């Protein structure tokens, strides 16, 4: 436990090098020094820091909404609307919406995630949101709630996302109207969890779905993991894959899920899910302490997955 504790303490100091997201006013109130980590195997768990603190999923939810849409419509149909290619651009970039036949490059950037939000099962905004919260509740094993303050704060600061949604609509990629797609997308970003929930969500991928009652085809889980590996950490995904080597997804709230298919970390063995909350983020949007923690962890415990 000493080695892991040391890595946590080293990474916790790195919070000073990041800044909390301020472009969504409600996120700006987060404690920049907060840093919590949870590691969960099928048998046991390890936690560092304040594990009851709630925060919003932000972009971490993009993996799960994509899976719900794929499970509902099938892989081929969803691939007509969104590709699985990395961009190397920032998550809210608009520049590539006029290339690649106007198709969003992947569901981990906002253009792809807004498209996916419009494709979710359900006739209304509430039903579409519910399709994802129900899936998450089956994975985590408890109810999840939407942080309405964060949602409203996002909705009133959504000019860029609205612009993206209008371009998507003009090019025939939205299955609902612009406002509904935005509301669904932003409500999903505002789902509130704690760091232990995140670790259990990561364990879902590590076990290929065997740790919970949530059903998802193996092919869809594989695609989701591949997307996390290639596009999950914004425009730092290549470096994350090269130097840490784990499928992972981050959000601007400072949340990260990281997936260890088969490893040994102290007394944890086999598939391990890692959840991190560290709201001080770097320029691309990743938790600074989270990246420091995962870099050391992967090295010390030989977790590189390829
Ligand atoms: O679209 C937004 O601005 C956020 N709700 C999602 C932010 C996030 O975590 C980064 N997006 N990929």
Image: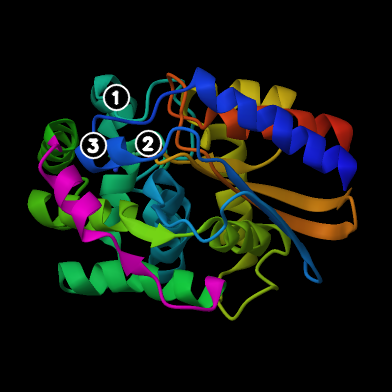
In front here: 87 or 209?
A: 209
Question: Where is mark 1, residue-wise?
Answer: 93
Question: Where is mark 2, residue-wise?
Answer: 109
Q: Quadrant of residue 89?
A: top left
Label 3, residues with CA under 10 Å away: few <14, some 14-19, many ≥20: some
Q: Position of residue 238 (x, y in %)?
A: 60, 23
Check if mark 2's residue and mark 1's residue have beta carbons within 8 Å.
yes
Give SS at disc 3. loop
Name the residue located 69 percent from the left edge and 33 percent from the top edge: 293
Check if mark 1's residue and mark 3's residue have beta carbons within 8 Å.
no
Q: Earlier in the sequence, mark 1 or mark 3?
A: 3
The answer for how far apart the CA atoms under marks 1 and 3 are is 17 Å
Task: Determine if the C-beta at disc 3 is less than 8 A from ligand 1.
Answer: yes
Q: Quadrant of residue 35?
A: top right
Q: Quadrant of the C terminus?
A: top right
Is residue 237 left or right of 95 when viewed as pictured? right
Q: Nearer the viewer, mark 1 or mark 3?
A: 3
In front here: 34 or 296?
A: 34
Residue range of the region highlighted in magenta in the rendering: 140-158
In front here: 142 or 160?
A: 142
The answer for how far apart the CA atoms under marks 2 and 1 are is 8 Å
Name the residue located 17 percent from the left edge and 55 percent from the top edge: 183
């Amino acid at each position: 436990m000493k080695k892991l504790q040391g890595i946590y303490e080293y990474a916790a100091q790195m919070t000073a090098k990041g800044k909390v997201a301020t472009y969504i006013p409600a996120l700006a109130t987060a404690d920049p020094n907060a840093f919590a980590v949870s590691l969960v195997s099928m048998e046991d768990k390890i936690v560092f820091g304040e594990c009851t603190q709630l925060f919003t999923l932000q972009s971490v939810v993009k993996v799960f909404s994509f899976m719900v849409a794929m499970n509902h419509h099938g892989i081929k149909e969803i691939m007509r609307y969104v590709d699985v290619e990395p961009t190397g651009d920032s998550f809210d970039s608009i520049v590539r919406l006029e290339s690649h036949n106007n198709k969003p490059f992947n569901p981990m950037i906002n253009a792809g995630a807004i498209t996916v939000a419009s494709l979710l099962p359900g006739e209304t905004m509430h039903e579409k949101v519910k399709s994802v919260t129900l899936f998450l509740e089956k994975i985590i094993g408890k109810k999840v709630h939407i942080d309405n303050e964060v949602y409203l704060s996002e909705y009133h600061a959504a000019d860029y996302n609205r612009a993206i949604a209008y371009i998507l609509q003009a090019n025939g990629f939205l299955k609902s109207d612009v406002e509904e797609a935005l509301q669904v997308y932003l409500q999903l970003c505002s789902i509130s969890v704690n760091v232990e929930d995140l670790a259990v969500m990561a364990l879902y991928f590590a076990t290929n779905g065997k740790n919970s009652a949530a059903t998802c085809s193996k092919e869809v889980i594989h695609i989701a993991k591949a997307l996390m590996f290639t596009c999950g950490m914004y425009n730092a995904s290549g470096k994350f894959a090269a130097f840490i080597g784990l499928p992972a997804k981050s959000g601007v709230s400072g949340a990260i899920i990281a997936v260890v298919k088969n490893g040994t970390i102290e007394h944890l063995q086999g598939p391990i899910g890692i959840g991190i909350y560290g709201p001080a983020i770097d320029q691309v949007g990743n938790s600074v302490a989270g990246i420091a923690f995962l870099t050391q962890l992967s090295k010390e415990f030989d977790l590189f997955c390829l």
